[in-house]
């Protein structure tokens, strides 16, 4: 095997939390006096940090308002996100393949670590993921490489030994900033064409197409 570890993004890479994200985002918007946003507008923000999502949906760049949005979003997400999240059908198969071949698996995501733990437990996949770096575990969200570099440091791995897999340009930028190989999947809202400006080992339609 070329890689000793694979780091996955979560949303639109390993699984789908669209309904939970939309419910949580619109709850936060309404609490702040805004109208609900259209489903597709919110979908296109998935992968951004919550303050960045707030800016994208409202145009308001006030940091304190972004934090207020985050607080309301998390309040609702704590209630409904796990029930409204699923792994993709091929995710467990790919994760099992990696485990059977001795390849470590981590998740680096803007979601909170306990949220990922809950989803993995619900989907009977917790055994496959050895490390989770959530948005609450870093000072700087993706595309800052902090989360990826935490994994490399914890496992004492060289950058060439780790593959980062994600569905968005934020993920492509994260891999670039961290200096690790990147594989893109088009299971989210980002197209093959969108990925063109970034180096990758390939852009794939789904996880099953990946070769490790």
Image (cartoon, rainbow, N blue to C red):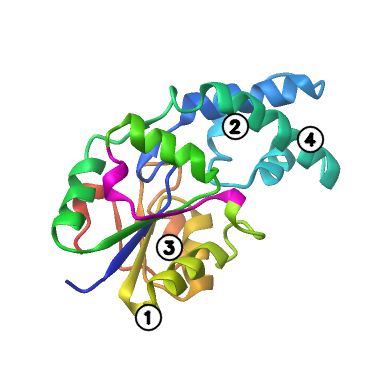
| Precedes in sequence: disc 2 or disc 4 | 2
Badge 1 crowding class, 10 Å Cα cut-off, few under 14, some 14 to 19, many 20 or more, is: few
| Precedes in sequence: disc 1 or disc 3 | 1
**Do we see residue 143 in this rendering?**
yes
| Precedes in sequence: disc 2 or disc 3 | 2
Q: How far apart are marks 1 and 4 (CA)?
A: 39 Å
**Bounds of the magenta span?**
125-136
- Residue at 31% from the left image edge and 76% from the top image edge: 161
The quadrant in which residue 163 appears is bottom left
User: Residue 7: horizontal and vertical position, in percent?
Assistant: 37, 59
Quadrant of the image containing the C terminus: bottom left
Where residue 68 is drawn, which disc sits there? 4
Where residue 158 is drawn, which disc sits there? 1
Badge 4 crowding class, 10 Å Cα cut-off, few under 14, some 14 to 19, many 20 or more, is: some
Where residue 59 is drawn, which disc sits there? none
In this view of the protein, which residue sits in the foreground, 169 or 29?
29
- Was residue 131 drawn as part of the magenta stretch in this picture? yes
User: Residue 169: horizontal and vertical position, in percent?
Assistant: 50, 56
- Was residue 110 drawn as part of the magenta stretch in this picture? no
Lateral position of residue 168 relative to residue 209, left or right: right
In this view of the protein, which residue sits in the foreground, 74 or 202?
74
Could you tell me if the residues under marks 2 and 4 are in contact, i.e. CB atoms within 8 Å? no
Local secondary structure at mark 2: helix
Q: Distance between the residues labelled 2 and 3?
A: 23 Å
């Amino acid at each position: 095997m070329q890689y000793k570890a694979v780091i996955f993004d979560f949303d639109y890479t390993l699984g789908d939390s669209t309904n939970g994200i939309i419910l949580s985002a619109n709850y936060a918007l309404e609490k702040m006096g805004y109208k609900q946003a259209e489903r597709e507008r919110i979908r296109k923000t998935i992968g951004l940090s919550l303050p960045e999502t707030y800016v994208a949906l409202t145009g308001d760049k006030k940091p304190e308002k972004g934090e207020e949005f985050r607080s309301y979003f998390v309040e609702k997400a704590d209630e409904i996100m796990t029930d409204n999240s699923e792994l993709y059908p091929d995710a467990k198969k790919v994760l099992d393949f990696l485990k059977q071949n001795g390849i470590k698996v981590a998740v680096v995501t803007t979601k909170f670590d306990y949220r990922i733990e809950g989803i993995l437990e619900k989907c009977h996949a917790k055994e496959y993921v050895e490390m989770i770096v959530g948005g609450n575990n870093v000072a700087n969200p993706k595309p800052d490489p902090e989360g990826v570099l935490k994994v490399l440091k914890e496992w004492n791995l060289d950058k060439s030994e780790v593959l980062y897999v994600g569905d968005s340009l934020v993920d492509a930028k994260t891999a670039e900033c961290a200096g690790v190989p990147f594989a893109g999947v088009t299971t989210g809202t980002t197209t093959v064409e969108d990925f063109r400006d970034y180096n990758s080992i390939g852009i794939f339609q789904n996880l099953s197409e990946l070769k490790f």
